[in-house]
Amino acid sequence: MLFVFRFFCLVFFYFVTLSLCYSVTLKSMLQNIKEIIKALPLTSGVYLMKNAAGEIIYIGKAVSLRKRVQSYFRPASAVLSKTDLLVADIRDIDYIPTLSEAEALILEAGLIKKHQPRYNIDLRDDKSYPFIEITKETFPRIMVTRPKEKRKDAVYYGPYVNAGLVREALGLLRKIFPYCNKKTCGPKECLDFHLGLCPGPCAGKICAKDYQDNIKNICFVLDGEKDQLYRGLQGKMAELGSRKEYEEAAKVRDQLRAVSALYSGSANVNFYKEAEQLQRLLELPRIPERIEAFDISNIMGEQAVGSMVSFLNGRPDKKNYRRFKIKTVEGIDDFQMMAEVVHRRYKRLKEEKTVFPDLILVDGGKGQLSAAVGQLKILNVDVPIASLAKKAEEIFLPRKRNPVKLSPESLALQLLQRIRDEAHRFAVTYHRLRRTKNAFRNRDEKT
């Protein structure tokens, strides 16, 4: 009997401990989600909900990202719904802000088609819903239709809910990649040609291949194939440049920028102004499209961690974020900690023969900058680098005695602040996670 009693006591103690651990973990997770929601903008955009493994489990669009995402986290009903099951699975939320709900519709549809999240429900494939129809003609046309039957000589995207929003979305795409929508038209340029919406196939202003390239690029957007779209445009721009067709190359460059703005949202609208200003002020060899930023987080040297965030075209590129446990530094030495994480990051990139960023940014002043520069020299890595000190928001550069001081209204400074603040947030979040795990471990050892 004594053995049985002890056994049940151990089982009881185990489940109580497990319950407490789960409760604390759940509380920590909910707090983290609350912080993520607070940081969401009130602008329109697409939100991507992820599980503990980092998989995208749901994609949605919103007129106001923060308000829409907040609406999911309401008290669970007596009977568990699909939304309750989704919410229980959420561990992180990413987002892409847009200038309009129509842009959000384009991105949402493409991302759902590409990632196929398990909590997204497809609409029924019947005539009550609008589709995008792309004909298979020499010069294809694009229309919004409600087909009773899908034609074999056309490709369909959808279904969608709001036909008006779909037409608005196509209007945005047509400004970037013009196409003709008339079944028959005369030999003269139409009004849409003069508005920049039609490339003028009937008037012989564009060949079939170039016209079909525009349609192919629209299909890439609707399919969510962003990487293929970028590669195609960059390749075409380089090819035109090599043939010294600079005017045509400039048109492709403008398409590339417009697509970048589409995918990166309202925060990207001023990116090229910010980046060009930053290039000029820091005397960079090229526009810093990819910037990697580092920060250190610790309390009196305890549970020290480093973070690295990556920004592409002014927007967070979270799949390339990295976290570092400090391994070689004991006590309080932020300079050496910064040196360690910078060394580990770029030693890894050298070994993997991966593309380096256009600019490295470290959080801090001269000391942090010198520590990072020293490691780049050891690794023989030649990448522009700067540091941004929080106290006076001064920018320090190698081989320059005095810091660069910019006006608070400077677009270049705002870009660096945005990236620096994200590196700090990411570092603090990881440090908090390590402290929580360490507290659990210490408690388990005592018990």
Image: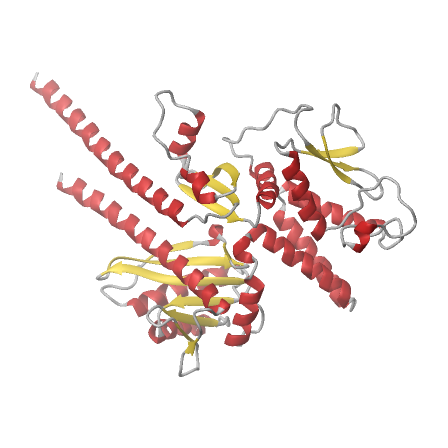
Instruction: Tell me what residue is drawn at x 52 percent, y 64 percent.
Output: 357
Instruction: Tell me what residue is drawn at x 37 percent, y 32 percent.
Output: 74
Location of residue 107 in the rendering, given as x and y in whole percent from the top left corner: 59, 43
The answer to whether one can see residue 331 in this image is yes
Check the image and report above or below for 351 versus 219: below
Foreground of the two, 342 or 273: 273
Location of residue 397 in the rendering, given as x and y in whole percent from the top left corner: 44, 76
Instruction: Tell me what residue is drawn at x 37 percent, y 20 percent.
Output: 79
Residue projecting furthest to the left: 2
Location of residue 143 in the rendering, given as x and y in whole percent from the top left corner: 75, 37
Instruction: Tell me what residue is drawn at x 38 percent, y 32 percent.
Output: 88
Foreground of the two, 390 or 212: 390
For the image, the number of numbered tags is 0
33 relative to 166 in the view: left or right = left
Foreground of the two, 145 or 375: 145
Foreground of the two, 52 or 154: 154
227 relative to 175 in the view: left or right = left
Residue projecting furthest to the top: 1
The answer to whether one can see residue 53 in this image is no
- For the C terminus, the image quarter is top left
Residue projecting furthest to the right: 187
Q: How is the image coloured?
A: secondary structure
Location of residue 405 in the rendering, given as x and y in whole percent from the top left corner: 42, 76
Quadrant of residue 111 within the rendered picture = top right
Check the image and report above or below for 291 versus 158: below
Quadrant of residue 54 within the rendered picture = top left
- For the N terminus, the image quarter is top left
